[in-house]
Image: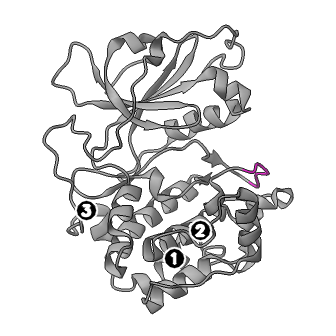
Amino acid sequence: MECEKNTLSIDDFRILKTIGTGTFGRVKLVKLKGNDKMPPFALKILKKKLIVKYNQVEHVKSEKLVLSKIKHPFIVSFFVSFQDETFIYFLFEYICGGELFTLLRQQIKFEGEVIKFYSSQIVLCLEYLHGSNIAYRDIKPENILIDRKGYLKLTDFGFAKIILERSYTMCGTPEYMAPEVIRHSEGHNWNVDWWSFGVFLFEMAEGSPPFCDENPIIIYQKILIGKFSFNRCNNRKLKNLIEKLLREVDKRLGRKAGTKDIKAHGFYKKLSWIDIYNKTIPPPWIPVVESREDTQYFCEYLDTDEASIASSVDLSQAFSGF
């Protein structure tokens, strides 16, 4: 899709339904008016007032910057951003298979070969992002979509940032935060992604993250202590990989040679990375969809007419030049 950001407005789209919600807005399935032959899009709609209220302006600007620089077969395609007085809009390709999180909850846990298939695609994403000095900082099953062929697409770059040296921002999802992010005074870089990748592996193998509690403070304490145990996983090499990832940053796998360290681990010994990249390995699960607008793999949400909501606060300065 080729278009300039200043030529688009929300009025150019026919809104079909809500397919996701978040702290600052919603993701809606939309169609471009006057062109029924074009596929549907996912339109991320963020409320400026909330972005400013929670001091997230720089994160949103960073998200746009990162999205404008990346293109990868396992990352959701970003087309354009635009804004009006009330909202920021990000337009993406629509991925119809739903979240990996949903599939994991249905199956409770994944077996070793399934984990290898899915996790290898995230490794390739991180290899690409880290090669561009981008730390993703929010790896979790909710941020991973399944396309109609059964392969993955990483989405939601709200915490992603280009880091040349260190960042001191405490951000991410509590259960997946690396200890150095929690101790934000020491700073962090892209190595935090290998910690959250370890949490991601553990969750696929066990059915839940290793550090859980209803109170985020308790979660942080558990992460800093760093103790966890396996109850369901019986794959020796996978457990070894997880144990090497869920370590303090100075001992964490990936710190020395990055992705090369991960790829060289015994868990991935028989995997063809080229076949994964080329998508020639049969997926363990393929969504059955009736049309390009099929949303059966997403949760049902109560739709609201957000496009009509106006703000009484002048937000033009905060998003000038966006």
Contact check, label 2 and label 1, Cβ < 8 Å: yes
Q: Secondary structure at mark 1?
A: helix
Q: Is residue 273 magenta?
A: no
Q: Foreground: 223 or 216?
A: 216
Residue under label 3, please give it.
279
- Any mark on residue 262, and which? 1
Q: Quadrant of the N terminus?
A: top left
Residue 73 in percent (x, y) is at 35, 52
Q: Amino acid at mark 2?
A: Trp
Q: Secondary structure at mark 3?
A: loop
Q: Foreground: 32 or 293?
A: 293
Q: Nearer the viewer, mark 2 or mark 1?
A: 2
Residue under label 2, please give it.
194
- Alpha carbons under labels 2 and 3: distance apart: 23 Å
Report the magenta stretch's main SS: loop
Q: Foreground: 301 or 115?
A: 301
Q: Secondary structure at mark 2?
A: helix
Q: Identify the residue at horizontal 41%, vertical 14% (top origin).
A: 10
Q: Amino acid at mark 1?
A: Ile
Residue 32 in percent (x, y) is at 28, 19
Q: Identify the residue at horizontal 66%, vertical 57% (top origin).
A: 174
Q: Identify the residue at horizontal 22%, vertical 69% (top origin).
A: 281
The reply to whether residue 132 is in sight is yes
